[in-house]
Image (cartoon, helix red, strand yellow):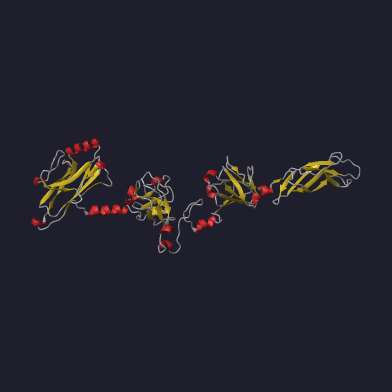
Amino acid sequence: MADYYTLLTNAGIAYETACKAAGVPIKLTQISVGDGGGTVYNPAATATALKREVWRGPLNALFQDEKNPSWLLAEVTIPPDVGGWYVREAGLWTDTGILYAIVKYPESFKPVLATSGSGKEFYIRSIFETSNASLVTLLIDDTVVKATRAWVAGYVADELAKLDSKQSVRVATTGNIALKASQTVDGIAVIAGDRVLVKNQTLSKDNGLYVVTNEAWVRTKDADTNLKVTSGLCVSVEQGTTQADTIWQLVTDGPVVLGTTTLVFQNITFGFAPLSSPVFSGSPTAPTANVFSNDDVLATTKFVQRALGSYAGQTNYDSDTQLTVADVGKLSIFTTAGSTATLPDWNSVPPGGLVHLTTTGGLTVKTRAGETFGAVNTTNLTSVVLQPGNFAVFRRLLLGPGWSLDSGDTALKYSPMFSTNGATVGYMKHPGGAIEQWGIGTTNAEGYVYITYPLAFPSSMRSISCLHGGTMALMGCVVYDSIEKTGCTLRVQNGSNGSLAGWAVYWRAIGI
């Protein structure tokens, strides 16, 4: 057995059992001290009183140990005007007068000024273990008890911890991390004892202020209870590659239950600091918002420049490539002729995300399996072909899964305004509304060729010209009649009375 100890008495255990069964708290009110009858002895659990009590008073404080929740700490201060005896034993008493716990105390003399020539306050702390620590309460008379210096310091620290402004942290996270052991956070190697703002966990309920330990991290003393973590909590960051000299605010509204409530932190660096703050001296910096951000976070010059149209970067590819969300906003250049680029996974890109492509040797652009090219500027496309030097911009559609070919010189080829059928009998539309059509026909025995246009002219045919494949004996004169929106009839005249059948006639018609 230890030299000095505290143990629950049998009567105390019975009282505790009865309280648990009745669902009522264990109420402790007083502590007494004794001189052990003049000698040091080993108290037993069968005790119902001290051997010789010399003083009794109200408990000053009763609280759980921070590291061992099953331990209770009881404190009392014996005033300077009593004493003249040794303290060798102490007892904790319930509100019903039961000796709940008995203490073997290191033999200590308590002087009193009147007889000893000096006096002092005498501080006693008793530590004991119970399986029902959370059920034990302290009944005190505020007009009698005295606060110890340690109690006052602890009380002030707890009250300060309830304020929204917290002690600064060394670093802040930029992504999900394992909350254990020493590691590198935002470019800084953190060690045991460092404070860290954790704000990017996949499970947002785990966000908050932590202290680094060699094992599992623990929440900091100023942010480890619901009362200390409230909406508006602010903390500044000292170091880090991207987060240094920033200030973050908890923007979660309503009551917080640590470990359950989602905790969201927002960068308020420029909105919080006064103009005289070092944050604004020299060339202040702040984290750049994500390329897809669309919220109320302040924008850095880097973000604004990118939003104005500058590429977020450039990547050169020399082979077939499956593009990813990392390529959105960048310029991707394909340098090998005949390469194929597959657009990113539609689900990974926010609506409106742009992919910029160009090629020096020719490129075919496709979508992933199950995704399509939409019908904004394109219709029923399975792929888009870029000729050497062409440029194309593809946009992630809101509804899909699909992409639209929005701009670039490649888009002209696939635009409805430039719709073209390049077959032997084909057509080409012009932006002004004109339609140019062409084809080839063969004359019958009378020299007639009956033409049906690939497209019916919306208004009328304006002009037609043709050439025939006859010999020099033919006069080369071609006439036409029966002109319609859908077609016309051509006739080849023969100047040498030769056969008119089987001659090729090439025609070109323009209309609107």
Q: Is residue 276 above or below residue 327?
A: below
- One can see residue 1 in this view: no
Q: x%, y% of residue 469?
A: 83, 45
Q: Residue furthest right?
A: 496
Quick check: 392 left or right of 447?
A: left
Front residue of this view, candidates 450 and 498? 450
Residue 388 horizontal side relative to residue 350, left or right: right
Q: Is residue 345 left or right of residue 449?
A: left
Q: Quadrant of residue 119?
A: bottom left
Q: Position of residue 389 (x, y in %)?
A: 64, 53
Count up the numbered dots. 0
* Residue at image point 38% right, 49% down: 208
- Image point (21%, 53%), residue name: 148
Q: Residue 368: x percent and y percent? A: 57, 42
Tell me which corner region of the image, top left, top right, bottom left or bottom right, holds residue 468. top right
Of residues 98 and 113, the one nearer the viewer is 98
Q: Quadrant of the N terminus?
A: top left
| Residue 284 drawn above or below residue 103 | below
Residue 325 shows in the view: yes
Name the outermost residue toward the top: 21
User: In the displayed structure, would residue 47 be above or below residue 313?
Assistant: above
Residue 195 location (% of width, % of height): 36, 53
